[in-house]
Image: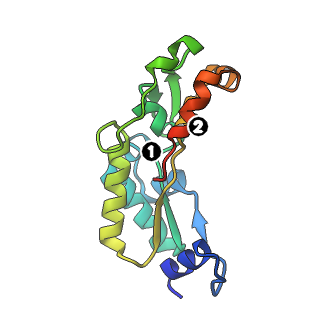
Amino acid sequence: MTSLERAMAVIRGQIPDRVPTDLHNFLMASRMAGIPLSKCLQSGELMAESHLVAWRHFGHDMILVENGTTAVAQAMGSGIIFTDDQAPRVIDPVLKSLDDIDKLRIPDPERDFPLPEVLKAISILRQELGDKVFIMEGGPGPDGACGSDKGARAVLPRSRRVRGSRDHREPA
């Protein structure tokens, strides 16, 4: 079986020739490729390049393309800091209190940065690798993005107004 066939067999509930492998590796991939993390995670071209370096080295069956759990939070309006030594993090959450809930909007993955860069990376990887490997996006849904800061974790579980936001999750 090819890597793609192996992953698709599992998705279809079939038994593959072996367990498919995936590396949740965007941080490691950046380092392996020698690309500063702060630049890699904001550029589709550099994200794709780093994943290609890791895939050529390890030959895993699935490539999980993401640029951190803060991507959707940033696309929804949160301020994010990118450094070269750790995953990005929220420094100015869009949701500071329950009163801010109406500020939330569903981000457009083709327009709201950094999501277009993730899509660009996926497109480049698909062009480079064709059907050799299963490629997927790995970012959180809107409720995960709202939980990217400590304040939201305290607010979200307590509000019926917020529970409706969870109904907007869609597959990547």
Query: How far across and down, in percent of the image, does residue 72 sit?
Result: 46, 37
Quadrant in the picture for residue 18:
bottom right
| Amino acid of disc 1 | Leu
Specify few, some or many for label 1: CA neighbours under 10 Å numbering under 14, 14-19, or 20 or more. Answer: many
Of callouts 2 and 1, the N-terminal one: 1
Q: Secondary structure at mark 1?
A: helix
Residue, x 48% and y 20% (percent of image)? 94
Residue 144 numbered tag:
2
Left or right of 62? Residue 109 is left
The answer to which quarter of the image holds residue 140 is: top right
Instruction: Name the amino acid, label 2.
Output: Gly
Q: Residue at x 46, y 28 (%)?
A: 80
Percent coordinates x, y for residue 87 in the rendering: 54, 40
Q: Position of residue 145 (x, y in %)?
A: 54, 34
Relative to 100, say whether 105 is above or below: below
**Colour theme:** rainbow
Residue 40 vertical placement versus 73 (above, below): below
Residue 43 percent location from the top left of the image: 33, 46
Left or right of 141? Residue 117 is: left
Q: Nearer the viewer, residue 93 or 23?
A: 93
Front position in the image: 37 or 139? 139
Closer to us: 117 or 140: 140
Q: Which residue is mark 1?
A: 37
Asked where in the image residue 113 lies, by quadrant, the reply is: top left
Q: Is residue 97 visible?
A: no
